[in-house]
Image (tube, rainbow, N blue to C red):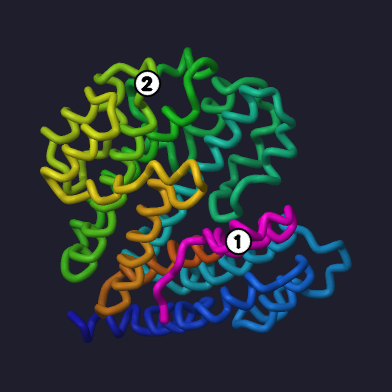
């Protein structure tokens, strides 16, 4: 198996490991947090493996410019791997893009419901989630027309549930739509990785099961106090996680954080994620932050094994988190909120 893998994918695996080794280390983040202006941030970034990503552009330093250039680098690395891949890695790489497509569609739906300019919304879309049909979106005047234009004959059409009430999309919370699409995506990606077998199946089913559980717990917590019925909540919970169906059914009926934590403790020990969440009021740490920290550790551990596709998935995830961290630091500097500048998610690469 290892010989066959190296013949087809050895070069791309080595390349991706090199990309990962060029990511920011703890010392690089320390340098960024010491910057006093966005111009200093840009100079500091160009002193890393990012190099001269800001080019000769003469526009004033801004968070938007920094984020755009960081995303462009991620896009370049993704498409280099994608363009040199063969099946089944090509399909695997496409699965990595689907969440970005789902987020872009959710952004457009939310914008349309709030009567935002479609041209401005398209500029806000993540480049990894762009697809041909997005260019024809400007004709949509409401979310129902948007779904007709985007979700019928597009890469993410396969993730649209048959029971999604298309006629009431204008009144349906966009996060509910996103949750339905993500559930279908995770379950199909899980099934695809399981079919691949070998180390890829072992590594990816572990990562995707964690992602499914994270979404389930987050949805259950966010639904507390809402008018979403237990039946509708259950429809949004992915079924490919470590949490068994009895846990999913139980959480769909709970309206207290402590009870959700108790269920998590019984089945898979996720309950520790809820410890000391009362500190949120002091801006210390959130439930999402805790899950991101655990996700970062899992994705770094992926690189400890060889001969599997998981490193491509984990690299994109880690790179996405790195961009998020740099943007967070840049926003804190731009808004003079330096007391919160160290609240980024550490990536344990050192």
**Magenta stretch contains residue 201:** no
Please state which of residues 206 and 89 is positioned toward the viewer in this rendering.
Answer: 206
Image quarter of the C terminus? bottom left
Asked whether, in this view, residue 347 is left or right of residue 104, the answer is: left
Look at 28% across and 24% down and name the residue there: 255
Image quarter of the N terminus? bottom left
**Within 10 angstroms of label 2, few (less than 14), some, or many (20 or more) residues?**
few
Circle on res. 225: 2
Could you tell which of marks 2 and 1 lies nearer the N-terminus?
2
Q: Quadrant of residue 87?
A: bottom left
Q: Quadrant of residue 127?
A: bottom right
Q: How far across and down, in percent of the image, does residue 183 sit? A: 32, 38
Q: Quadrant of residue 108?
A: top right
Q: Height in image: 192 above or below 40?
A: above
Magenta segment range? 323-350
Look at 41% across and 56% down and name the residue there: 96
Task: Give the number of marks.
Answer: 2
Asked whether, in this view, residue 93 is left or right of residue 210, the answer is: right
Asked whether, in this view, residue 208 is left or right of residue 34, the answer is: left
**Magenta stretch contains residue 328:** yes
Residue bearing the label numbered 1: 341
Q: Nearer the viewer, mark 2 or mark 1?
A: 1
**Within 10 angstroms of label 1, few (less than 14), some, or many (20 or more) residues?**
some
Q: Residue furthest right?
A: 58
């Amino acid at each position: 198996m290892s010989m066959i893998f190296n013949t087809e994918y050895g070069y791309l695996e080595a390349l991706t490991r090199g990309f990962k080794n060029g990511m920011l280390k703890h010392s690089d983040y320390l340098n960024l947090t010491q910057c006093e202006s966005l111009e200093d941030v840009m100079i500091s970034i160009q002193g890393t493996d990012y190099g001269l990503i800001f080019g000769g552009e003469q526009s004033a330093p801004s968070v938007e410019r920094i984020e755009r250039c960081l995303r462009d680098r991620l896009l370049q690395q993704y498409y280099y791997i994608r363009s040199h891949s063969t099946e089944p890695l090509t399909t695997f790489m496409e699965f990595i893009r689907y969440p970005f497509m789902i987020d872009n569609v959710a952004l457009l739906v939310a914008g349309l419901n709030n009567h935002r300019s479609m041209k401005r919304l398209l500029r806000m879309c993540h480049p990894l989630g762009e697809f041909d049909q997005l260019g024809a979106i400007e004709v949509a005047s409401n979310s129902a027309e948007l779904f007709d234009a985007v979700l019928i004959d597009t890469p993410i059409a396969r993730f649209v549930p048959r029971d999604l009430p298309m006629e009431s999309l204008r009144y349906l919370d966009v996060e509910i739509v996103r949750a339905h699409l993500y559930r279908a995506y995770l379950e199909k990606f899980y099934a695809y990785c399981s079919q691949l077998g070998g180390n890829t199946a072992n590594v990816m089913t572990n990562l995707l099961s964690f992602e499914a559980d994270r979404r389930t717990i987050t949805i259950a917590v966010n639904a507390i106090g809402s008018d979403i019925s237990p039946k509708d909540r259950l429809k949004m919970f992915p079924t490919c996680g470590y949490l068994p169906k009895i846990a999913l059914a139980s959480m769909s009926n709970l309206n207290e954080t402590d009870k959700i934590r108790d269920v998590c403790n019984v089945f898979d020990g996720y309950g520790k994620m809820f410890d000391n969440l009362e500190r949120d009021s002091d801006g210390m740490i959130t439930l999402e932050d805790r899950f991101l920290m655990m996700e970062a550790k899992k994705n770094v551990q992926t690189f400890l094994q060889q001969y599997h596709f998981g490193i491509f998935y984990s690299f994109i995830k880690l790179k996405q988190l790195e961009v998020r961290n740099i943007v967070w630091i840049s926003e804190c500097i731009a808004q003079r909120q330096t007391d919160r500048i160290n609240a980024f998610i550490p990536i344990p690469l050192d």
